[in-house]
Image (spheres, helix red, strand yellow):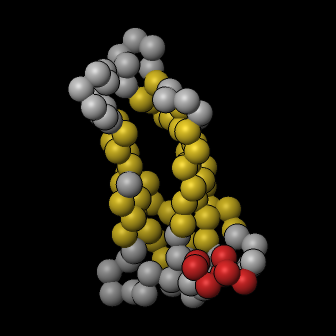
Amino acid sequence: MAKHGASGQAYVARTKKRVYLWIGPSGTNSVGPAMKRKYIFVAGDLSSDERWNGSDEVTIQFYDFGDGVVASEARRRGTPSNHVATVRFARDARSGGFIEVK
């Protein structure tokens, strides 16, 4: 995963953030094509948590702590986060690759 902020703006500013996700085979025994997605979210210091349910399903939650707030400082102070988005992917039984679950 790669996250990029708006050009010429501080990353902590509430602006459009581009997120590039890639889920693909790891190791020589994995099958299925790579899955690539691009998302655009409006957020401050965009953070994410990934949670795998075995090797066939992953949920990614995106959040921030507000405009201009640095995520690491907010976590240290125990500041509550703001939900930005949740995306979920599961392995497709036919292709062996991952698909987005809506």
Q: Is residue 63 above or below residue 76?
A: above
| Residue sitting at x 45%, y 14% | 93
| Residue sitting at x 55%, y 39% | 52
**Horizontal relation, residue 27 to residue 94: left or right:** left
| Residue sitting at x 69%, y 68% | 82
Pick the quarter of the image with the C terminus.
Answer: top right
Residue 42 in view here: no
Place residue 75 in its image quadrant.
bottom right
Q: Which residue, as the protein is rendered here, is positioned at the far top?
A: 94
Could you tell me residue 48's position as x and y percent?
54, 60
Residue 18 in view here: yes
Residue 101 or residue 80, whichever sits in front:
80
Q: Is residue 75 above or below residue 62?
A: below
Pick the quarter of the image with the N terminus.
Answer: bottom left
Place residue 78 in its image quadrant.
bottom right
**Horizontal relation, residue 36 to residue 46: left or right:** left
| Residue sitting at x 52%, y 69% | 46
Could you tell me residue 49's position as x and y percent?
57, 56
Q: Is residue 14 above or below residue 61?
A: below
**Horizontal relation, residue 74 to residue 30: left or right:** right
**Horizontal relation, residue 93 to residue 75: left or right:** left
Could you tell me residue 65's position as x and y percent?
65, 76
Place residue 69 in its image quadrant.
bottom right
Residue 71 or residue 27, whichever sits in front:
27
Q: How many marks?
A: 0
Could you tell me residue 72's position as x and y percent?
58, 79
Q: Is residue 76 above or below residue 16?
A: below
